[in-house]
Amino acid sequence: MSTDSADLELVALCKRYGAGTPAVDAINLQVRAGSYCCLLGPSGCGKTTTLRMIAGHEVATEGDILLGARNITDLDATQRGTAMMFQSYALFPHLTALDNVAFGLKMRGVDAATRRKRAAELLELVAMGAYAARKPSELSGGQQQRVALARALITNPKVLLLDEPLSALDPFLRVKMRAELKRWQKELGFSFVHVTHSQEEAMALADQVVVMNAGRIEQQGTPHEIFNAPRTEFVARFMGGHNVLPAGGAKVAVRSDRTLLSRAGGAGLAATVHNVEYQGTYVLVTLASAAGEIAAMLAEAAFDAAPWSPGEAATVSWQGAHAHALQS
Ligand SMILES: Nc1ncnc2c1ncn2[C@@H]1O[C@H](COP(=O)(O)OP(=O)(O)OP(=O)(O)O)[C@@H](O)[C@H]1O
């Protein structure tokens, strides 16, 4: 399998469907060759439109898409060096796994013997050689995903584009296939650009997380950077696991497992416990305060040593080093 990945770059890329707010608003993004990038954001933020412009399924209104040394903005989808894997895998129900995989080469005019040989090699690569003669309805969700991956790989892409590839799977299989996708990406050595609305999925998979909001990139970085130093209130709230709290006329984000509760009063925010939820390793204590709802994740042993009950008054505080100033 060739692994000639290339850097992907989006330069001031825009998509407007009509008057009003653009679906994608002049985004700049670099995805390094051989890396796993997740486009993450709520419904309607423009992530699918961005992916479809990279794939050539949607025309860019303005801006450029560069792949290695080539400007692919206006090229036909089949000429770009990208391949797409869809949410429902989009396998043809009446074709066998082998013919589904071979299909991409048929479209490119490759002769039948060559395309079947190549398709068989790719099915072996994804450990599906034994299922070559089966139709999609005779395969499990995970097996269909592997066939879809082999089908995307047959055109030798430099970048694989994945649109919510795990959302059709049940939660158990989703976690299993997530690990498999990551392994394939490392083994194949080329870039994956994966659209998801799941924070957990992006954190588990990505080298680079790109958080989008209303057509713009709100923040990008490693999962660790995004989770530990959210730059805006949107990112802190969207990633979860943080409280957004007032501090000196500005707002800061503090992780809920670093939010401290005391009965002694002193410096901090006055709050009232309104719910206590046992979660195993942690106990989640939610409180009402003038700054809105606050969540504190207390280690089980700490909670057991001094339990909290609904209705109790508490003072919420945090260490300065654990607070991240947020841009408005
Ligand atoms: N063909 C279209 N015509 C008009 N507007 C569109 C079209 N496709 C998308 N949009 C609009 O562009 C914006 C971005 O849509 P997009 O599908 O990229 O969002 P998304 O982040 O992928 O959301 P989701 O997670 O729901 O798929 C939305 O406001 C959407 O309504």
Image (cartoon, helix red, strand yellow):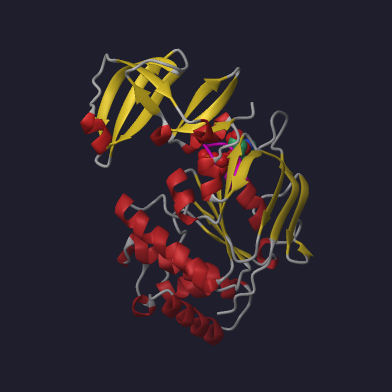
The residue nearer to you, when weighing 272 against 306, is 306
From this viewpoint, is residue 179 visible? yes
> Residue 258: horizontal and vertical position, in percent?
42, 34
Q: Quadrant of the C terminus?
A: top right
The residue nearer to you, when weighing 152 against 318, is 318
In the image, residue 296 above or below residue 199: above
Q: Which residues are magenta?
A: 41-49
Taking 165 as reference, is 38 left or right? Answer: right
Q: In percent of the image, x 41 and y 22: which residue is there?
A: 316
Q: Quadrant of the N terminus?
A: bottom right
- Would residue 3 be counted in the magenta stretch? no
Q: In percent of the image, x 56 and y 37: which residue is there?
A: 230
Q: In percent of the image, x 40 and y 61: which residue is there?
A: 179
Rendered-image quarter of ligand 1:
top right
The residue nearer to you, when weighing 271 against 35, is 271
Q: In percent of the image, x 45 and y 18: which residue is there?
A: 268
Taking 122 as reference, is 231 left or right? Answer: right
Question: Where is residue 317, by image quadrant?
Answer: top left
> Residue 294: horizontal and vertical position, in percent?
41, 23
